[in-house]
Image (tube, rainbow, N blue to C red):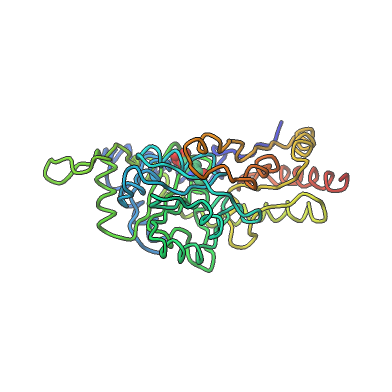
Amino acid sequence: MVIPVAAPTRLAPEERAAVREAVLAVVDAQQWVLGPSVARFERELAAYVGGGEVVGTGNGSDALCLALASLGVPPGSRVLVPPNDSGFAGQAARAVGLEPVVHDVDPVTMGPTVELLSAALVPGTAAVVVTHLHGDPLDLVAIDAWRSAEGLLLVEDCAQAHGARPDGRHVGRTGDAATFSFYPTKNLAAVGDGGALLLHDPATAERARSLREYGWGERGSVDHPRGRNSRLDELQAAVLSARLPHLDRRNARRRALLDRYRKALHGSATRVHGDPVAGVAHHAVVLDARRDALREHLHRAGVGTAVHYPHLTGEMRGIAPRGGRTAVADRQRHEKLTLPCFPELTDDEVEAVVAALEAWRDAS
Ligand SMILES: *Cc1c(COP(=O)(O)O)cnc(C)c1O
């Protein structure tokens, strides 16, 4: 038996019971689309992140599309996107008629800096999407000042960072919009697909609500050409409401696991990524120039691993005028390895991962 990197259907008994109850309640309530469960979850998530308006969507990719569209990023304009998010932001940009331009990343944070964003900035750029990758919140103070000076809209992709509160403030409150995914492996997860966007301006939120339902307006008009159908289901919303109260406890467990791995690898050449305090350890990522040997070692010890993410930024480069300068991201693509890290890992499994890491440390 290989220890899995993620096991989204393994729920603690208490949480499984809450999910089952939520699903049955929706079946009995007999309203399945845009009903009270969606409205309730939107309110609860907004309260959890500290204010603003939440608009539920079909998934996290659509949330990115709807964020860019509802903010009015002009069709044909360019959007700076990360080179290492496996293309989530770039694909969303393209889907709403925008041209993604990749930038390189800082080797330690794996995220953007003002310098790197400036280097990638091309004429016609209207927005920046930043991603709190692997559950590690970015420091956006300098980037926010820079993008305001440049007149750029800012979208925060929080699909891997639910519950991250650097400085006590939840991620997603700096940008003009923030997006979430509730795909089953995410820190806050549905039992299928789901997503949401967080907006601070009521008029923009109103536009997003229209855009997620065909672009319909109030009096039977079709108001927005970028309208689509991307609704959060009642079933998924009810499940998310049932699971939200478990999020902080589950994140604490993720953080503790990452901390165990960090200690196990202390003194080795393998670097453990992530802020041990502010992060929410969506992925337990380590970096090693001998990544494939480490992966083989762990595999022999029955420890599953993954690479987040192996995808080339090359395809983006083809259409990005100044893309291609992503040396750090390209190098890290060959050094990164994700270890099993989810709250329902058993103590025996954790000990097995730790023992395998210690053996690697002692042998290298
Ligand atoms: C999962 C994810 C997405 C996409 O979400 P879906 O719900 O799968 O469409 C976007 N961005 C990031 C950072 C993600 O992790």
Is the residue 101 above or below the residue 310 in the image? below
- Give the camera-side residue of 358 and 311: 311
Is the residue 302 above or below the residue 176 in the image? above
Residue 302 image point, x, y percent: 75, 34
The answer to whether residue 98 is left or right of residue 249 is left
Residue farthest along the bottom direction in this orientation: 167
The answer to whether residue 61 is left or right of residue 111 is left
The answer to whether residue 328 is left or right of residue 317 is right
The reply to whether residue 339 is visible in this rendering is: no
Residue 346 image point, x, y percent: 67, 44
Question: Which residue is at a point 28% across and 40% down the rendered structure image?
Answer: 226
Residue farthest along the top direction in this orientation: 1
The reply to whether residue 226 is visible in this rendering is: yes
Residue 185 image point, x, y percent: 53, 41
Number of callouts: 0
Residue farthest along the left direction in this orientation: 219
Question: Which residue is at a point 54% across and 49% down the rendered structure image?
Answer: 103
Residue 78 image point, x, y percent: 40, 46
The C terminus, quarter of image: top right
- Give the camera-side residue of 105 and 24: 105
Question: Which residue is at a point 59% across and 51% down the rendered structure image?
Answer: 105
The answer to whether residue 169 is left or right of residue 303 is left
The N terminus, quarter of image: top right
